[in-house]
Amino acid sequence: MSETANTIRFLLNDTEVALSEVHPTETLLDYLRLNRRLTGTKEGCAEGDCGACTVLVGRIVDGALAYEGVNACIRFVGSLNATHVVTVEHLAGKDGALHPVQQAMVDYHGSQCGFCTPGFVMSLYGLWLSNDNPSRAAIEKALQGNLCRCTGYEPIVKAAEAAAKARPADVFDPIEKTREMVRKRLAEMKGDQTIVTGKGDQRLMVPQTPAALADILSEHHTATIVAGSTDVGLWVTKQMRALNPVVFITGIDALQTITETPDGITIGAGVSYSRAFAALSSLHPALGRLIDRIGGDQVRNMGTIGGNIANGSPIGDTPPALIALGASVKLTARTGSRALALEDFFIEYGRQDRRKDEFVESVFVPAPKRGEHYAVYKISKRRDEDISALCGAFRIALAGDGTVTSATIAFGGMAGTPKRAKAVEAALIGKRWTEETVSAARAGFEADYQPLTDWRATAAYRLLTAKNLVTRFYLETTGERAELVRYEGVA
């Protein structure tokens, strides 16, 4: 392993923190409440769902200091090197005067029981920093990751609208007044050494380069790579799992890149959903609509597309969408790199084509081709911030006479891995894109998938929904009408 350091350094509000002893799975929420007695940050769900624990984390991105709301309950302290953590206690002025966001919540009665209020304040503060004049849609999007059982949200939305207009020149804002100073201090903290604390299974490692990450994995085959921790965090908070040595990759700038070419987009494995949104939605608008329904802002700010792929979940939302587009992944180890079609990365449940010394370095998403139609459909019990029962992605190319020249269909939630619907594809290719062709192809789903029944959906519901989605895709590409098959339930 290359030269190492043994201290994680970050700013907490206006105080510099240096930790040489950090448990690999200590959450930011526990650190704030138990170690620092900053109890404004609450624990509600401990799984990144309710937003009561929302704080802002600032980091240097492309040379500028950017702040994002995150879920402290599933964010690990080990991932915070060279960041600025801002909690609700930091917002008020030194004289106790409330920040405009806090004052608006008081004025518009945005709090009742008050438990969730600090999280709402921090989400609205993140919006206040990034958007001078947010639309109602932007406000609602900013609050997707915050749940409240008291107010019905309308007072909170009105508070957000009022706060956006409350920007007096003399207002003390703890971030805007210190932004350049904080940026310089974080740059000084960054360093180029791999940070290592602890021993054995309690070891925590924070590499700064892909080469350093490759060196670590060549020596520690049981190490758990943690990017956004939106999934891994629940392994700890809900399943009480030990992660053995933990490797945090949030500090590797080379994995934070987005490269656009005429052929498509290459996205580094450390790029979050939020940062990838503009590029992906510009390339394929359907991907933007999908990302908007992945968790709330906090999850999208933390979670990464590379992590969603690497953990191999059969209900991850991005793999079926990217498989349908013909995406590929770059896998890297100390011995070199290799490219692999994304659909071939998933072998079976819990098993991917990735050696223990390899990591996902990037994913390539091809640009659309003339004559292609593409759509993604996420089906869940709750529209926002919910895990999919199934997610289907469709891409077809049509000749001038309406003949299907190619078809790629992929689903998550229908098998042990994200999986192509090859029987359905075969039934479409070479046929005219008509209602009759689509109706006949629906039967292919029964050959392609044998879904399970769980608490999200029954097997019968999943299978019938998949059939209806290909009909929906046909209707959306043609504007014609067809009768959808209704789900009658199972005995």
Image (tube, rainbow, N blue to C red):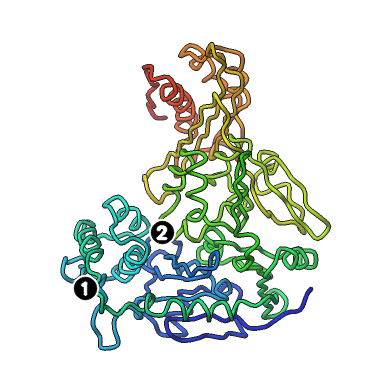
Please, what is the three-letter code of the amino acid marked with disc 2?
Asp
Crowding around mark 1 (Cα neighbors within 10 Å: few <14, some 14 to 19, many 20+) is some
Q: Earlier in the sequence, mark 1 or mark 2?
A: 2
For the point 68% across and 80% down, the residue is: 198
Location of residue 24 in the rendering, given as x and y in whole percent from the top left corner = 61, 74
Element carrying mark 1: helix
Query: For residue 164, which quarter of the picture?
Result: bottom left
Query: For residue 160, which quarter of the picture?
Result: bottom left
Q: Is residue 66 left or right of residue 221?
A: left
Element carrying mark 2: loop
Q: Is residue 487 above or below residue 30?
A: above
Location of residue 395 in the rendering, given as x and y in whole percent from the top left corner = 55, 29
Image quarter hosting the N terminus: bottom right
For the point 25% across and 88% down, the residue is: 95
Location of residue 458 in the rendering, given as x and y in whole percent from the top left corner = 46, 36
Where does label 2 land, which residue?
49
Crowding around mark 2 (Cα neighbors within 10 Å: few <14, some 14 to 19, many 20+) is many
Q: Which residue extends farthest bottom?
A: 95
Location of residue 140 in the rendering, given as x and y in whole percent from the top left corner = 30, 53
For the point 66% across and 49% down, the residue is: 350
Q: Is residue 140 above or below residue 105?
A: above
Where does label 1 land, which residue?
103
State how far apart marks 1 and 2 are (Cα): 26 Å
Q: Is residue 291 left or right of residue 341?
A: left
Q: Is residue 312 above or below residue 219?
A: above
Image quarter hosting the C terminus: top left
Please, what is the three-letter code of the amino acid marked with disc 1?
Gln
| Most foreground residue, 278 or 155 | 278
For the point 58% across and 22% down, the residue is: 424
* Marks 1 and 2 close (CB-CB < 8 Å): no
